[in-house]
Image (cartoon, rainbow, N blue to C red):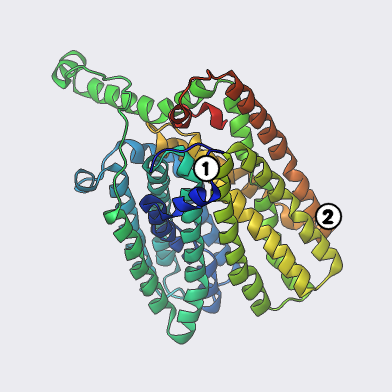
Amino acid sequence: MASVTPGARSWRTALGIYLRRSVVTMIFLGFSAGLPFMLIFATLTVWLREAGVDHTEIGFFSWLGVTYSVKVLWAPVIDHLPVPGLTRLLGKRRSWMLAGQIGIAAGLLGISCVDPTADLRILAGFGLIVAFCSATQDIAVDAFRIEAEEEIYQGAMAATYQIGYRIANLVSYTGVLYLASIGSWHMAYQVMAGLMLLGMTAALLSREPAHPPRAVIGLTERPVDAVVTHLGGLRYRLHVLAAWFGGAVIGPLVDFFARNGWRALAILAFVGCFRISDIAMASMANPLYIDLGFSKPQIANISGAYGLCMTLLGAMAGGTAVVRYGLMRPLLLAAILASSTNVLFAYLAVQGKSTGLLTLTISADNLSGGFAGAVFIAYLSSLTNTMYTATQYALFSSLMTLPGKLVSGFSGMVVEAHGYAAFFLYTTLLGGPAIVLVAYLLRRSEVAGRALPASRPDSASLSRPTNREAI
């Protein structure tokens, strides 16, 4: 399929991108990425509590989530180093994906063999293995997704990735609870380990994306023998380490600021602000439902299964909007929706228990969340240079979640002091900086677009290594 540009295609053509092989593949890779997340957090806490583990020890297991927020620390390794025995056969991205998936499956099998009441530390150890391998898989899948298609298809790639991810969340939470009730927790986790074969198959059958030549810092074109002669063994190894650090760690940061100049600061500020509103409110949504008197089945049906359908619908809409209108205008709409829907939670808190109002609130929140997720992932993808895809995307995704997690830690204190309604209104205001920043970036992109030569080919504007018009 030839390259197309925003505004130059029909809705039928825009929706047709969901039939592309690479776009369909992301459903299975998204499923593989989403499966382990719930299994070491929400689902695992149910098992631990049922086994009689106290709340304090269960709380410690949440620290496994830090692994996902610091994955940028080993992203340069995945961006630059091969997997022994695999990279030569599968390529850089697919080999790291497969290595992560094998580690996840092994960790889940390990968890399935442990008795939480007798070997809690061993269980935590296997959980850490799953978390580390899952974060490693995320880095490789994100890099693969960005490199496998040009920018105009990134919205659809992000949408189908989210579809697979959300389905996996449902399977690994609701599905495991059902399996554990009719069988055992050990059997349920063994089934989940087996489902990782879907991701492994997708990695093996997918096509390795092309990788552009990488700029090498340090030992550029000098023969190794000459370096050893001049520097000696130890000095040579230190020089190699310094050269690798410069190319793998410093290079991606220098590249990002070199391409974007001072706008890089506005971009990073926007990335850090975009999800503060929805991450901050998420920790108090379920307590609100319980305090209003909704039953667990009601919450599971409306917030769980029905909410998933709304999220997937929103993700599809977001991916289609990126193809139809480009990145920046849907991104502005996403920023507005992500924060403004929190007002409905405040209204629900004031009105009290109402199944209809809860359904409306969940509909709006999940639709906007799915839309914003697809558009924002596409935007983050557009910011990367294909020479440093894994490292730069890991940096952006880590920055995306950390501020919201820090603010979320104080959410219970705000509710205790001011009540639910005030809290959700506060979280709405937290979305203000993101709206202002994306409006500024949109304005800058429009100015830059008017300054481009009229003869510039459309396909040139889609070059990911530069991506000026995306910011």
**SS state under label 1:** loop
The picture places residue 356, in percent across and down from the top left corner, at: 76, 72
Q: At which x and y percent is residue 133?
A: 38, 54
* Residue type marked 1: Arg
Taking the spot 33% from the left edge, 70% from the top edge, the residue there is 194
Q: Is residue 128 visible?
A: yes
- Tell me the quadrant of the picture where the C terminus can be found: top right
Q: Residue type at mark 2: give it.
A: Ala
Q: Is residue 379 left or right of residue 338?
A: left
Dot 2 falls on a residue whose secondary structure is helix
The numbered disc on residue 453 is none
From mark 2 to mark 1, how far is it between C-alphas?
A: 44 Å
Q: Can residue 70 be seen here?
A: no
Q: Nearer the viewer, residue 66 or 76?
A: 76
Q: Nearer the viewer, residue 185 or 4?
A: 4
Residue 285, compared with residue 137, is above or below; it is: below
Residue 429 lies left or right of residue 182; in this view the side is right
Q: Which residue is mark 2?
A: 422
Left or right: 371, with 257 as reference point = right
Q: Is residue 381 above or below residue 422?
A: above
Q: Determine the image quadrant of residue 269.
A: top right
The quadrant of the rendering that contains the N terminus is top left
**Label 1: few (<14), some or many (≥20) within 10 Å?**
few
Pointer 1: what residue? 9
Q: Nearer the viewer, residue 74 or 239?
A: 74
